[in-house]
Image: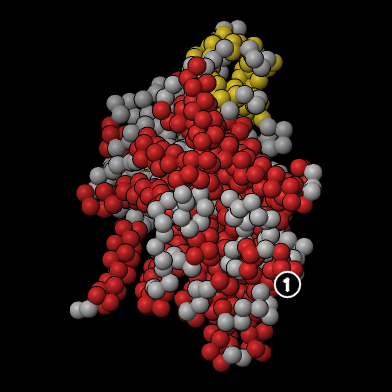
């Protein structure tokens, strides 16, 4: 029987994970390579078992086997196959199964990629990862068994969560986010391993940086996809509401981003080792906290699943992870101090330091806002909520400063900068930024935040372009290459640097799009009878008729649709609907989003009266929203570009012979100001 | 105490408040609106149904009762919920007694509703002066209360019932009855 098979796979996965923890630790202490191999195989096997259990659940969902409680609660015979498959993460137990599948997948991948290398770190990292897997397998064995049976067997179920079935994006947003969340366990594991073995060295930094960047990409794309989903489905016309669960995804992203930056300083200057280790630990603890907040029902949110017995287990896990890693960090502190050197006030190090301070500032603000209602409730019994305006007001200045730093950082050299070189580098970008602000003012834009965003974004993009042009010119001159080829080679041979610049450019695009769409939009609400029209932002929307009919692919879902004709910069017809799902207590909005590069026309059906065919429509004109998603795509491409393995290896001897820059191994990028030929030794 | 030893205080300072805070938030359903009635005896009543019979609270003892406050004007929530209730009545048969209570509505409205969306197989009580709704503390339809066989209110649903909620709550009550009663 499939449910028995699934449950057996979970129990076996638990046993193997426990074995892997013990075997890794013993292998590390005795330096026993045979035991180490055995532990590795246990990790691979636990991944296979998690995959088996997940596959069993998918088959149960596809075959609508209502003898399994999870299926009975999250599926219906009419559920289309695509939504049956993605119901794997529709509710708590399935999510944890999916989570475990991804986590053991990451663990297997890293164990496999590091075979034969990093022999001091891997056993401890493996033990940490196996401990985390043990926890998740244990949760599924006891309180959160996804294969729990139910009798009597129902002949029909309610179908998946209505919000889940309303948009195909649900097939993308949770997996990306989960890939990011689970992947961040890997750098944490190596952080713990480094603290245990007292090896926070170059080798360690290299591994952790790479294994943070990959989940970071998934997390970034997952958050962007979530914002997009929220925009396309929820019908309120926005994409970010500072919902506690959105915050839960943002928090580890903030600390992971801070880590990516501070690791560069750690790598370059040997400084910030403690700080860097602390960020890795904090990131993982924040993913656990995020999971807890999402899955325990502690905080009210559209994302919360109903309360369950899993909560106390997660709380215990958070307490253990936090106590253990913090304790370890404090214990090892004496060995980590000492390599710090003070940075010059105007230097790239300082820019990175300030960057980290700002990221941490935002992290604390968001964490505070998320937990504050809970604290107030605990202390005084009052119910309060922290709204979007508070987050916007606190975080907007910090984000603006970060944006500014994004330009200044790359323009400053390592070590100490002279004022002359700073002036030389920042002159044109400052002029571009100011010109952008003046132009926007002339075009009628008002408001400090959007204007500052435009100014800073132009400033940053100019600096990034200038960096590329300078480097390409220098290379073209010394190598005699055509400009375009020189630029491409420069970029592909300095993937981290130029990939990072592309990420920054994407962030600039997103920042401008967010600032403008959040402040320059227009909206109107009107109650209309058929034939009546409303105006919004230069569009005329004429309400034609109301249609009520069941959905084609799921007849149990009733759709009420208002058909509207549009005249304006975009024209044609649109339909905006409310859908009644059998599993949902409230109708689910299906807003109509007409996208163009300049603006989106967003129309939501708020309410209707079937008797008189009267409808109330909310229409918004949101400028530049599509650029948020495009910018997110650029960020993803830039990050992938940065970590793309370099197949072409420069023979070290040859590189050393060319110029003095290559002699210092920690420096892997050309000095920006140097006119000397750029030589890079980039390890694959 | 040396400075180095003081560092260790950082662990409890950070961990303990966080854990206490999260611990406090436990077990709360974020959507739940507390009802004073949970764990208390169901309010007593004797009311006339839509088809003229009289139903009293005492005669409902012995099996789980789902008291559902609704109105024909409560659209679409009550329409949606009605389908769920019809399904639950079919599924649970005589092991669950459903009782509808008309909330600020006319008998005529209720009859039209039944004709249009499916005649209920359970009695609909008329509560003309809203006395029972007041006793239960109803804020607005639809709202439902699940009462166990001993007449104790076990669960309150604010807003329409869904199949998942019914499966969960009624299932729990029925299995408890089987387990407890032997």
Question: Please, what secondary structure does the residue beneath circle 1 have?
Answer: helix
Against A456, is A532 above or below?
above
Q: Is residue A629 above or below residue B29?
A: above
The location of residue A267, given as percent across then percent down, is 53, 65
Out of B115 and A552, give the one closest to the viewer. A552
Q: Mark 1 belongs to which subunit?
A: A
Residue found 63% across the figure and 85% down from its top: A36
- In this rendering, would A546 be left or right of B25? right
Considering depth in this image, is B50 or A405 the residue closer to the camera? A405
Pointer 1: what residue? A653
Depth check, front residue: A543 or A524? A524
**Which residue is depicted at the point 25% across and 44% down?**
A382
> Furthest residue to the left?
B1
Q: From the top left corner, tell me how far across and down residue A293 is, in percent.
A: 43, 54
Image quadrant where one finds the C terminus of chain A:
bottom right
Hey, which quadrant is residue A356 in on the image? bottom left
Q: Quadrant of the N terminus of chain A?
A: bottom right
The one nearer the camera, A281 or A11, is A281
Q: Position of residue B6 (x, y in %)?
A: 25, 74
Residue for point 61% across, 19% down: A562
Residue that appears at 30% across and 42% down? A384
């Amino acid at each position: 029987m499939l449910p028995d098979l699934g449950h057996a796979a979970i129990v076996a996965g638990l046993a193997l994970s426990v074995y892997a923890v013990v075997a890794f630790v013993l292998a590390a202490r005795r330096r026993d390579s045979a035991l180490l191999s055995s532990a590795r195989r246990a990790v691979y096997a636990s991944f296979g078992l998690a995959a088996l259990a997940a596959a069993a659940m998918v088959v149960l969902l596809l075959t609508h086997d209502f003898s399994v409680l999870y299926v009975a609660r999250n599926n219906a015979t009419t559920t289309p196959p695509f939504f049956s498959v993605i119901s794997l993460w529709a509710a708590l137990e399935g999510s944890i199964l999916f989570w475990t599948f991804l986590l053991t997948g990451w663990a297997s991948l890293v164990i496999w990629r590091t075979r034969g290398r990093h022999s001091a770190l891997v056993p401890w990292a493996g033990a940490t990862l196996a401990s985390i897997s043990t926890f998740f397998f244990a949760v599924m064995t006891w309180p959160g068994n996804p294969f729990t049976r139910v009798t009597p067997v129902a002949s029909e179920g309610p179908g998946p969560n209505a919000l889940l079935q309303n948009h195909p994006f649900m097939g993308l947003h949770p997996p990306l986010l989960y890939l990011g969340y689970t992947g961040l366990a890997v750098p944490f594991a190596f952080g713990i391993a480094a603290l245990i073995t007292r090896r926070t060295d170059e080798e360690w930094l290299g591994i952790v940086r790479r294994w943070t960047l990959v989940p970071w990409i998934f997390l970034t794309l997952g958050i962007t996809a979530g914002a997009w989903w929220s925009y396309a489905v929820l019908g309120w016309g926005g994409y970010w509401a500072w919902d506690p669960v959105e915050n839960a995804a943002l928090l580890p992203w903030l600390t992971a981003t801070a880590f990516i930056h501070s690791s560069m300083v750690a790598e370059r200057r040997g400084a910030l080792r403690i700080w860097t280790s602390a960020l890795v630990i904090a990131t993982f603890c924040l993913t656990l906290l995020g999971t807890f907040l999402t899955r325990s029902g502690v905080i009210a949110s559209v994302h919360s699943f109903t309360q369950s017995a899993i909560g106390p287990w997660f709380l215990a896990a958070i307490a253990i992870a936090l106590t253990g890693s913090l304790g370890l960090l404090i214990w090892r502190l004496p060995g980590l101090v000492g390599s710090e050197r003070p940075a010059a006030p105007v230097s790239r190090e300082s820019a990175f330091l300030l960057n980290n301070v700002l990221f941490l500032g935002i992290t604390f603000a968001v964490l505070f806002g998320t937990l504050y209602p809970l604290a107030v409730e605990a202390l005084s019994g009052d119910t309060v909520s922290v709204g979007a305006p508070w987050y916007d007001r606190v975080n907007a200045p910090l984000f603006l400063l970060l944006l500014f730093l994004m330009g200044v950082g790359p323009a400053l050299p390592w070590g100490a900068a002279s004022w002359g070189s700073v002036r030389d580098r920042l002159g044109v970008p400052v002029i571009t930024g100011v010109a952008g602000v003046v132009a926007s003012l002339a075009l009628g834009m008002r408001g400090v935040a959007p204007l500052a965003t435009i100014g800073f974004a132009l400033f940053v993009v100019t600096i990034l372009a200038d960096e590329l042009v300078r480097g390409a010119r220098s290379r073209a001159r010394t190598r005699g290459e055509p400009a375009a080829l020189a630029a491409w080679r420069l970029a592909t041979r300095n993937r981290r640097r130029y990939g990072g610049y592309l990420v920054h450019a994407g962030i600039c695009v997103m920042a401008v799009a967010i600032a403008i769409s959040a402040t320059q939009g227009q909206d109107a609400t009107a109650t209309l009878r058929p034939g009546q029209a409303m105006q919004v932002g230069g569009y005329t929307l004429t309400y034609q008729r109301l249609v009520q009919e069941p959905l084609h692919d799921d007849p149990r879902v009733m759709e009420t649709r208002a058909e509207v004709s549009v005249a304006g910069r975009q024209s044609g017809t649109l339909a905006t609907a409310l859908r009644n799902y059998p599993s949902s207590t409230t109708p689910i909005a299906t807003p109509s989003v007409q996208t163009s590069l300049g603006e989106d026309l967003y129309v939501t059906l708020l309410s209707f009266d079937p008797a008189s065919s009267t409808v109330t429509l909310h229409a918004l004109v949101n400028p530049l929203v599509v650029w948020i998603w495009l910018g997110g795509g650029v960020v993803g491409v830039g990050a992938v570009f940065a970590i793309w393995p370099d197949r072409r290896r420069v023979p070290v001897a040859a590189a050393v012979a060319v110029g003095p820059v290559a002699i210092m191994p920690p420096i892997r990028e050309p000095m920006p100001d140097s006119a000397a030929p750029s030589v890079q030794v980039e390890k694959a | 105490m040396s400075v180095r030893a003081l560092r260790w205080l950082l662990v409890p300072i950070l961990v303990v408040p966080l854990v206490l805070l999260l611990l406090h938030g436990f077990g709360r359903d974020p959507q739940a609106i507390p009802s004073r009635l949970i764990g208390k005896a169901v309010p007593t009543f004797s009311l006339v149904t839509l088809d003229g019979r009289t139903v009293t609270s005492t005669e409902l003892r012995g099996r789980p009762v789902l008291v559902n406050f609704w109105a024909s004007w409560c659209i679409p929530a009550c329409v949606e919920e009605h389908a769920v209730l019809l399904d639950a009545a079919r599924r649970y048969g005589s092991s669950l007694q459903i009782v509808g209570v008309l909330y600020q509505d006319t008998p005529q409205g209720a009859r039209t509703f039944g004709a249009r969306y499916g005649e209920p197989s359970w009695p609909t009580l008329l509560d003309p002066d809203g006395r029972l709704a007041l006793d239960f503390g109803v804020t607005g339809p639809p709202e439902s209360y699940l009462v166990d066989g001993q007449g104790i209110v076990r669960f309150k649903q604010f807003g329409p019932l869904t199949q998942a909620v019914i499966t969960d709550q009624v299932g729990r009550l029925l299995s408890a009855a089987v387990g407890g009663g032997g």
